[in-house]
Image (cartoon, rainbow, N blue to C red):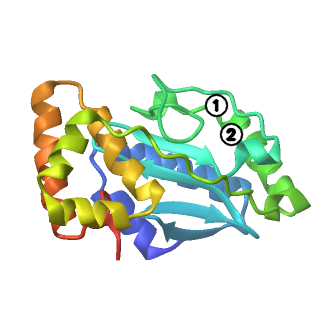
């Protein structure tokens, strides 16, 4: 077991630590040869390829199997509501699947890990531009520097900003996001610039 995963668990919220500890224990008990690795800021468990992951958020945890659908792995959703991974939002150890069910899924995923489908690259679909909201179009007309950088971004990067604006639940939030967006665009920043190295 790797120290950086220990640190990840130790730095998680108190409610999350027992969930992450139990998940980690079950994975290692079931698959003694599994490797741990931090990827995209969360713990992954790997054999030949990424097998499964766990993640802690402020109010819930998530656990899931990497490419479960492509591998044909049937994972019943548990937890309270939809969350990252296939098990919903895990709020306590009571939301975890029974040990026997989790072990069965881990063994199935491990068996599929070496199959040809596990290494078949996914076909990339050409991104489709989201319709630009009128409020954004008008704002960009008044901010040349922001508009110039927006036009230079990829369709996916433009969509990130547009979707962020569309997801605003209130006019106040929408206006605040629009202001932040224009500021970041003028500084040549994509929507997720904070997470880029």
Q: Which residue is disc 1 drawn over?
A: 98
Q: Could you tell me if residue 115 is visible in this image?
A: no
Q: Are marks 1 and 2 in contact (CB under 8 Å)?
A: yes
**Quick one: which residue is furthest to the right in this view?**
116
Q: Which mark is residue 102?
A: 2
Q: In this image, 168 relative to 127: left or right?
A: left
Q: Is residue 178 above or below residue 91?
A: below
* Point 48% across, 42% down: residue: 62
The quarter in which the N terminus is drawn is bottom right
The location of residue 193, given as percent across then percent down, is 29, 65
The answer to which quarter of the image holds residue 157 is bottom left
Along the line of sight, the residue nearer the viewer: 84 or 185? 185
From mark 1 to mark 2, how far is it between C-alphas? 6 Å
Q: Secondary structure at mark 1?
A: loop
Q: Could you tell me if residue 162 is visible in this image?
A: yes
The location of residue 110, given as percent across then percent down, is 79, 56
* Point 17% across, 34% down: residue: 174
* Point 61% across, 27% down: residue: 77
């Amino acid at each position: 077991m790797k120290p950086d995963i220990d640190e990840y668990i130790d730095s998680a919220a108190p409610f999350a630590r027992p969930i992450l500890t139990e998940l980690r224990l079950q994975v290692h008990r079931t698959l003694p040869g599994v490797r741990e690795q931090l990827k995209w800021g969360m713990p992954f468990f790997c054999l030949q390829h990424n097998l499964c992951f766990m993640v802690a958020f402020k109010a819930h945890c998530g656990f899931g199997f990497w490419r479960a659908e492509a591998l044909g792995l049937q994972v019943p959703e548990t937890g309270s509501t939809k969350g990252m991974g296939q098990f919903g939002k895990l709020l306590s150890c009571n939301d975890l699947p029974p040990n026997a069910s989790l072990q069965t899924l881990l063994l199935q995923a491990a068996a599929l890990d070496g199959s040809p489908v596990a290494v078949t690259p996914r076909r990339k679909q050409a991104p489709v531009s989201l319709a630009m909201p009128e409020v954004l179009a008008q704002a960009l007309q008044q901010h040349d520097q922001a508009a110039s950088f927006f036009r230079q971004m990829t369709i996916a990067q433009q969509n990130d900003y547009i979707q962020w604006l569309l997801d605003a639940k209130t006019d106040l939030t929408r206006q605040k996001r629009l202001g932040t967006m224009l500021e970041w665009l003028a500084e040549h920043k994509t929507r997720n610039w904070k997470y880029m190295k």
